[in-house]
Image (cartoon, grey):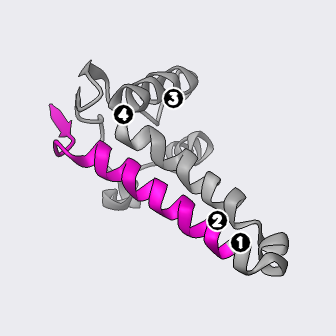
């Protein structure tokens, strides 16, 4: 079993960091209109924020794990951990079955097995 927990202040600190970055980008864009027009730093920052927001809520991560598990059903050689319990601040899940591909010895698998693993990946 694996337990992931947030530090008690991580959500508030992350939101504050995001607000500070957004204000800095606004100031930059006002002072550098030509550069901002080309690079669109506010849009780039939103891409970063859209990746950060789910990281401060483990229920979203659990949803993604369960969705990914469904998507992997047709594949025999790839698996994800099972979500056991979740809150916004705590995620309890099983260990992912199997071993990392980096730890495998190619000689332990036939060419047919290696081909199937490669196809699944």
Foreground disc of the pair 2, 3 = 2
Q: In which quarter of the image is residue 3?
A: top left
Going by the image, does 100 lie left or right of 91?
A: right
Label total for image: 4
Q: Which of marks 1 and 4 is nearer the N terminus?
A: 1
Does the stretch in magenta take in 10? yes
Which mark, by number, is residue 68? 3
The residue that disc 2 covers is 26
Between residues 39 and 66, which one lies in front from this camera angle? 39
Does the stretch in magenta take in 107? no
Q: Is mark 3 on a helix, strand or loop?
A: helix
Q: Is mark 4 on a helix, strand or loop?
A: loop
Q: In which quarter of the image is residue 39?
A: bottom right
Q: Which contiguous range is marked in magenta?
A: 1-28
Which mark, by number, is residue 29? 1
Structural distance between the alpha carbons of marks 2 and 3: 36 Å
User: Residue placed at 79% from the left, 80% from the top?
Assistant: 35
Q: In which quarter of the image is the N terminus?
A: top left
User: Residue placed at 53% from the left, 48% from the top?
Assistant: 51
User: Residue placed at 21% from the left, 42% from the top?
Assistant: 6
- Please rate how many residues cluster around mark 2, counting C-alpha atoms within 10 Å: few if below 14, some from 14 to 19, many from 20: some
Structural distance between the alpha carbons of marks 1 and 2: 5 Å
Going by the image, does 118 lie left or right of 5?
A: right
Q: Which of marks 3 and 1 is nearer the N terminus?
A: 1
Foreground disc of the pair 3, 4 = 4
Structural distance between the alpha carbons of marks 4 and 2: 27 Å
The residue that disc 4 covers is 57
User: Residue placed at 42% from the left, 49% from the top?
Assistant: 109
Which secondary structure is most common in the magenta stretch?
helix
Residue 55 sits above or below residue 60 on the image: below
Structural distance between the alpha carbons of marks 3 and 4: 17 Å
């Amino acid at each position: 079993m694996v337990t992931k927990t947030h530090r008690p202040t991580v959500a508030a600190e992350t939101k504050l960091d995001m607000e500070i970055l957004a204000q800095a980008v606004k100031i930059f864009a006002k002072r550098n209109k030509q550069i901002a027009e080309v690079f669109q730093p506010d849009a780039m920052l939103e891409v970063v924020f859209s990746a950060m927001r789910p990281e401060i809520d483990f229920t979203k991560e659990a949803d993604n794990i369960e969705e990914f598990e469904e998507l992997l059903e047709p594949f025999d050689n790839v698996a994800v951990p099972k979500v056991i319990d979740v809150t916004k601040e705590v995620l309890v899940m099983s260990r992912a079955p199997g071993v990392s591909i980096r730890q495998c010895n190619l000689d332990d698998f036939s060419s047919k097995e290696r081909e199937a693993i490669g196809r699944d990946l």
